[in-house]
């Protein structure tokens, strides 16, 4: 199987929908998972630091990006956000390519790419199937405000950067409802894996 690329499941979902936990459930089933957020965290402590300091002076300290200062520099500023994305997205893409090459070499039949802004960045072009994690708006709001320092203003600004949940669900191959408990979510993950085992790759085997 090492010569055939894995079937690529792309996992996405809006703020506080339960995407990260859903990704862990795929990992529990033995599926390799690439976490774009974790990759960004690593870049903010290494490869991306110098470029971010140059683009946004004063947003790094002790060789790391100060995420609060960087967020303040780009929140609500579309031009600044585009500048940041131009630095970070190619580095994340390179890390994702390395992950896929390693998974292929190891003979993985299925992988998950956990990509928060999947549709917004056009990354869905590489997917064989898209799983959108979703929950009702009241559940999303409650979960979001369990996070420290969340405010209505910040919540609204973050949502404004994301495609509406209804549109994501419309584009999905599978919608994973995260509002009905952990075991229900785990069962949905297992069902999705059974179904994708019968699906064809969208972009061939190469």
Image (cartoon, rainbow, N blue to C red):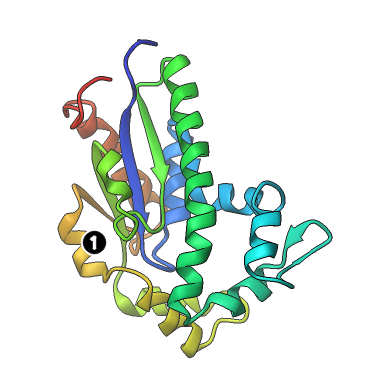
Disc 1 element: helix
User: Dot 1 corresponds to which residue?
Assistant: 168
Residue 106 in the figure: left or right of residue 123: right
Residue at 26% over, 68% down: 165
Q: Name the image quarter holding the C terminus.
A: top left
Indicate the position of residue 87 as horizontal and vertical percent values: 54, 55
Q: Foreground residue, 198 or 113? A: 113
Count of marks overlaid on the render: 1
Q: Can residue 30 be seen in the rendering of this structure?
A: no
Quadrant where the N terminus lies?
top left
Looking at the picture, how far across and down is residue 32, in whole percent? 46, 31
Query: In this orientation, which residue lies closer to the viewer: 138 or 184?
Result: 138
Point 64% across, 61% down: residue: 52
Q: Is residue 128 above or below residue 104?
A: below
Q: Residue 66's image quarter?
A: bottom right
70 sits to left or right of 179: right
Answer few, some or many: residues within 10 Å of disc 1's Cα (few below 14, many 20 plus, some between 14 and 19): many
**Above or below, 82 relative to 189:** below
Residue 11 image offset from top left, x and y in percent:
35, 48
Residue found at the far front of this picture: 54
Q: Position of residue 45 (x, y in %)?
A: 71, 52
Task: Report whether residue 173 is seen.
Answer: yes
Seen at 26% across and 39% down, the residue is 192
């Amino acid at each position: 199987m090492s010569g055939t690329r894995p079937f690529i499941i792309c996992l996405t979902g809006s703020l506080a929908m339960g995407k990260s936990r859903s990704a862990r459930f795929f990992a529990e089933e033995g599926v390799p998972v690439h976490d774009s957020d974790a990759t960004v965290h690593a870049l903010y402590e290494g490869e991306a630091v110098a470029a971010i300091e140059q683009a946004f002076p004063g947003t790094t300290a002790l060789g790391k990006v100060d995420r609060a200062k960087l967020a303040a520099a780009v929140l609500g500023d579309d031009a600044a956000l585009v500048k940041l994305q131009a630095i970070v997205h190619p580095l994340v893409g390179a890390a994702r390519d390395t992950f896929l090459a390693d998974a292929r070499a190891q003979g993985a039949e299925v992988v998950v790419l956990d990509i928060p802004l999947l549709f917004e960045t056009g990354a869905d072009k590489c997917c064989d199937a898209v799983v959108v994690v979703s929950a009702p708006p009241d559940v999303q709001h409650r979960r979001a405000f369990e996070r420290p320092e969340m405010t209505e203003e910040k919540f609204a600004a973050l949502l404004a950067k994301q495609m509406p949940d209804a549109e994501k669900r419309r584009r999905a191959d599978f919608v994973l409802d995260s509002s009905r408990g952990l075991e229900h979510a785990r069962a949905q993950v297992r069902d999705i894996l059974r179904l994708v085992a019968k699906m064809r790759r969208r972009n061939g085997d190469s």
